[in-house]
Image (spheres, rainbow, N blue to C red):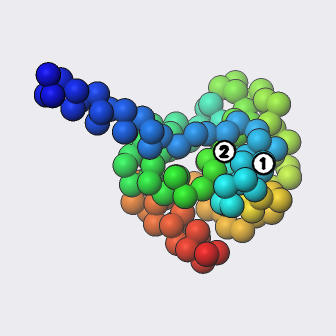
Amino acid sequence: MKALLIPFVVAGSLFAAEPGWETSLPAAQARARKEHKLIFMDVWTEWCGWCIRLQKETFPSPVAKAALARVVPLSLKTQLKNGTPTADAWVEKKFKIEGFPSLFLLDADGNVVAAMPGYLPPDQFAAWINQEVAKRK
């Protein structure tokens, strides 16, 4: 009986480690204030291959999940596959985005504290997040 419970406990603890992604800047700001954390903002499009790779390879990795636990993760899709703007397209102009993906660390007021254009593999992504968070502790 004990052997059957162990997989469920392990699976449950992995689920608990999942970062809760926000999908609006105001929600991320409220959470950042409450949790006293920076906001990690991923600005992406459906047509961007590097954006999809970031979401499928980098963010799910254990090292990236650990780094994302130190911030409030925010995902904003600004364009559909055919280039049609989404409701979050305003982000492109506000943050002067020139390419995708565009990665930002923001304070709780929405001010940019660090920016990184393009794809990062898991180890580099985690190192960037951890370094920027450490600077502000």
Query: Does residue 18 appear anywhere in the picture?
Result: yes
Residue at the spot of label 1: 30
Q: Quadrant of residue 6?
A: top left
Q: Residues within 10 Å of mark 2 (few under 14, many from 20)?
A: many
Q: Looking at the figure, which quarter contains the N terminus? A: top left
Residue type highlighted by circle 2: Leu
- Measured from the top left, where is residue 64 in percent x and y? 44, 52
- Observer-side mark, 2 or 1, equals 1
Q: Is residue 84 left or right of residue 7?
A: right
Query: Does residue 117 appear anywhere in the picture?
Result: no
Q: Is residue 37 left or right of residue 59?
A: right
Q: Quadrant of residue 56?
A: top left
Q: Is residue 11 above or below residue 96?
A: above
Tell me which residue sits at (66%, 44%) in the image. Answer: 74
Residue type highlighted by circle 1: Ala
**Residue located farthest toward the front when viewing the structure as drawn:** 1
Residue at the spot of label 2: 74
- Measured from the top left, where is residue 111 in percent x and y? 80, 63
Q: Nearer the viewer, residue 61 or 134?
A: 134
Q: Is residue 30 left or right of residue 72?
A: right
Tell me which residue sits at (65%, 26%) in the image. Answer: 81
N-terminal-most mark, 2 or 1: 1
What's the distance in space between the residues labelled 2 and 1, CA to CA?
Answer: 12 Å
Tell me which residue sits at (85%, 49%) in the image. Answer: 93
Q: Looking at the figure, which quarter contains the C terminus? A: bottom right
